[in-house]
Amino acid sequence: MRKSIIISLLTAFIMLAGFTSCNNSSQQYDPAKPFEAVDVFPTPPRPAGQSHVLELRTEPLEKVRVAIIGLGMRGQGAVRRLSYIDEAVIVALVDVVPSSVERAQQTLERMGRPKADAYTDAEAWKEVSRRDDIDLVYICTHWDLHAPIAIYAMENGKHAATEIPAALTIDEAWDLVNTAERTRRHMMMLENTNYDFFEMATLNMAQQGVFGEIAHAEGAYIHDLRSMLFAEEGEPGHYWDMWRLEHNAEKDGSLYPMHGLGPIAHILNLNRGDRMEYMVSVSSGQFGLTAYAEEKFGKDSDYAKREYAKGDMNTTLIKTARGKSIKIQHDVTSPRPYSRIHMLSGTKGFAQKWPRTGIALEPDGHNWLSDERLDSLLKVYEHPIVTEVGEQARQVGGHGGMDFIMDYRLIYCLHHGLPLDQDVYDAASWSAVIELSQVSVANQGMPVQFPDFTRGAWKELETVTYYTID
């Protein structure tokens, strides 16, 4: 309902502003008065008594006492990974499916960890967030509960870490920001791709000037999820209540932009020296979900007859305040090889992970580095965090180790009282692409402005920093 009202108001505003022709007359473009991105969601003033939480430091924690809420695919992995970290203690396990809680308890037992308190009530996350013996609420539920649980946790004095996306709407994003600023609690979106080995190496290279001034970057989430979206209960990859299919049925836009955006956002110092200023977004038609449903269930099935809003490929273009451009793509319904693209183009060099992993540098920028030179370069610029914990990460696993580095860094920073690598402004701005893209797609790729979730504080810093005690 809220989305339809916004779109109706936008359409009326655009017509009044002259963005569309009226009475079939041609609208003349005046170069002296160029169109501007529409400020659909203006940045509100910071409430009295609040201040920004960029590079927030909180009290060091000798042990980080953790409650994990949601024990599906991601939650089960988190239980195992956190059990490898001495400074983390899993105190509570929460899921509405009792067998999932039992699986997690068995993991703790297998890892030599004490049994955690178990909860299976749908509202148990509130009780857990109010407990005095928990420092961190780690959220792995379906998307709709991510922001509500994180907000409630912070309001009850807990740090919050949530699987992606952190917010589904701009209102939720602002609620996360304002709650973090008011409570002075950490809020992190668990974007694991920032900790992939190649991405961390290119972050290190960019911060040392190897690529020169980076003018353009690209990222994506191209992942064929059709078999999982349509997996019914008992089938491999099933989402509880098939909730992810519902999002693709109801919304058209970039529904999952963070995997591609997160790593390049840090490389471009977004929210710490630059920020996303405006964006446009367009989607192809929807073909893949219907075709797959017809093949699996038959043309007369309810799944095949259903209307799915999400176009197969969404492409979003973003311009930053410092003049950088970003392309983000989202496609989960096409038979394509997996790709997050991760491409950087600068004045001195180029890097890309998919479909071919390679780097090109001046003075021979037209050609890829040889495999031997590429391997040597990546070793030279291996990120110090990877040097520190990379071997253990490879052994523990989790998407090749990046999941473990993510958890390790979260606990490390809380243990030492350091700023987290990712903060609430990252969570809010990266998630904001979801609703902004829906508005843009619904209005023929209309340019829309980004809210400034830091409210100008991004100008106070120059670069993203992953802090250590050294």
Image (spheres, grey):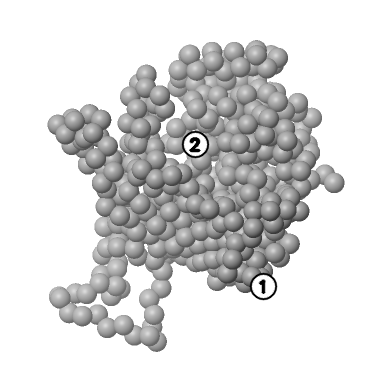
Q: Which residue is mark 2?
A: 146
Disc 1 is placed on an element classified as loop
Count neighbours of disc 1 (C-alpha within 10 A) and say few if under 14, some if 14 to 19, many if 20 or more: few
Residue nearest the observer in this picture, 111 or 378: 378
Q: Position of residue 149 (x, y in %)?
A: 52, 33
Q: Position of residue 56 (x, y in %)?
A: 70, 48
* Closer mark to the observer between disc 2 and disc 1: 1
**Quadrant in the picture for the N terminus:** top left
**Residue 90 in sight from this viewpoint:** yes
The answer for how far apart the CA atoms under marks 2 and 1 are is 47 Å
Residue for point 26% across, 52% down:
285
Vertical placement of residue 262 versus 129, above or below: below
Disc 2 is placed on an element classified as helix
Q: Amino acid at mark 1?
A: Pro
Dots 2, 1 in contact, CB < 8 A: no
Residue nearest the observer in this picture, 187 or 42: 187
Q: Quadrant of residue 302?
A: top left
User: Reading the chain from its start, which is encountered first: label 2 or label 1?
Assistant: 2
8 left or right of 32 in image: left
281 left or right of 292 in image: right
Residue for point 41% across, 73% down:
36
Q: Amino acid at mark 2?
A: His
Residue nearest the observer in this picture, 173 or 109: 109
Q: Which residue is mark 1?
A: 363
